[in-house]
Image: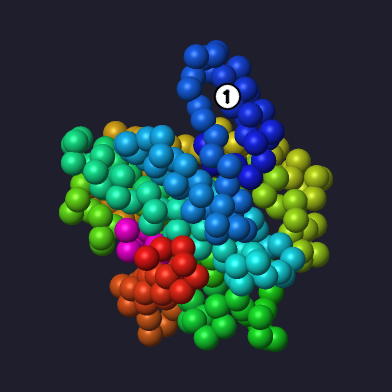
């Protein structure tokens, strides 16, 4: 389990052990701050110093529609937290996953990116390579468009991983987990949406069954990372709740293949320029 706060991680582990009545569960914590790419690299290095196998990776960290800000690494908060840090972690752990895949049946090793249906709110061109942090004044300069771009990035990343790793027996997926009853909306910066995330509205959504509880919200991820029903035909696809194949519509005049290849090259170039990969 990766976490920025060791205290919160330990509390979560104790809760898992209590709910499963499995005090013997062996759950370790990797300290990692997604807004600090150096800490992501350090976490990967720590894992590789202790482990020789890795069967599954769920890229699940995320922030949503938060106030605009640029990290010390030079990237907009949501773009780095939701996309870049996951890309870097996955890249650094891919060799051990490839090695693991040589010892087990195809599809035993999997990578899952948690995206969102709000990928639809990405800029008109999908990924704005000319203004990757979406800082220029205009329609794209709002928290939800920045969030949408980061979530589209998760989807495109999974497509690239499928293209590169499927023949090596590693299956991948991206997914929308559903509208889940978590604290993800706590820092939303748009008034109208904040009202929708208020306690009375959340209560109503729970009552009518529109919002998934945290258990239900994990089902699609669990299906993708460990489900027997997730087969070779589903590798590289986008899933919707609960565990159904979905679709992602690309911007007009853009293909998914072109966009994912361009994004991979851009990301790899940026990470090399900053010294995080060689």
The mark tally for this picture is: 1
User: From the viewer's perspective, is 144 left or right of 27?
Assistant: right
Identify the residue under disc 1: 16
Pick the residue in front: 205 or 122: 122
Q: Residue at x 44, y 78 (%)?
A: 251
Pick the residue in front: 8 or 194: 8
Main SS class of the magenta portion in the image: helix
Classify mark 1: helix, strand or loop: helix
Asked where in the image residue 139 lies, by quadrant, the reply is bottom right
Q: Residue at x 54, y 65 (%)?
A: 150
Question: x%, y% of residue 62?
Answer: 59, 53
Magenta-drawn stretch contains 157? yes
Q: Residue at x 62, y 78 (%)?
A: 134
User: From the viewer's perspective, is 234 left or right of 133?
Assistant: left
**In this view of the protein, can residue 118 be seen by the observer?**
no
**In this view of the protein, can residue 46 be seen by the observer?**
yes
Pick the residue in front: 123 or 51: 51
Question: Considering the image in quadrants, where does the C terminus appear?
Answer: bottom left
User: From the viewer's perspective, is 12 left or right of 230?
Assistant: right
Q: Residue at x 20, y 35 (%)?
A: 104
Query: Which segment is the magenta one?
Result: 156-161
Question: x%, y% of residue 53?
Answer: 32, 36
Question: x%, y% of residue 126?
Answer: 48, 76
Question: x%, y% of residue 212?
Answer: 59, 40
Above or below, 69 relative to 105: below
């Amino acid at each position: 389990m990766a976490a920025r706060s060791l205290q919160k991680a330990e509390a979560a582990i104790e809760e898992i052990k209590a709910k499963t009545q499995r005090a013997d569960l062996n759950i370790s914590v990797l300290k990692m701050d997604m807004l600090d790419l150096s800490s992501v690299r350090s976490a990967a290095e720590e894992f590789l110093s202790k482990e020789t196998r890795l069967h599954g990776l769920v890229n699940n960290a995320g922030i949503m529609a938060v106030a605009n800000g640029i990290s010390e690494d030079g990237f907009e908060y949501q773009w780095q937290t939701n996309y870049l840090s996951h890309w870097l972690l996955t890249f650094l752990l891919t060799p051990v996953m490839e090695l693991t895949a040589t010892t087990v049946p195809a599809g035993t090793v999997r990578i899952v990116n948690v995206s969102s249906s709000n990928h639809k709110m990405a800029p008109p061109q999908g990924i704005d390579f000319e203004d990757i942090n979406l800082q220029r004044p205009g329609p794209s300069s709002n928290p939800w468009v920045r969030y949408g771009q980061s979530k589209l990035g998760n989807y495109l990343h999974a497509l690239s991983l499928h293209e590169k790793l499927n023949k090596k027996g590693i299956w991948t997926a991206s997914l929308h987990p559903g509208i889940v009853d978590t604290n993800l909306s706590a820092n939303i910066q748009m008034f109208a949406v904040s009202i929708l995330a208020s306690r009375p509205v959340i209560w109503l959504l729970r009552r009518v069954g529109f919002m998934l509880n945290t258990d239900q919200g994990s089902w699609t991820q669990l299906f993708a990372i460990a489900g027997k029903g997730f087969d070779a035909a589903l590798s590289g696809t986008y899933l919707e709740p609960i565990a159904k194949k979905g679709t992602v519509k690309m911007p007009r005049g853009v293909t998914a293949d072109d966009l994912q290849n361009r994004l991979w090259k851009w990301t790899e170039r940026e990470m090399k320029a900053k010294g995080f990969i060689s």
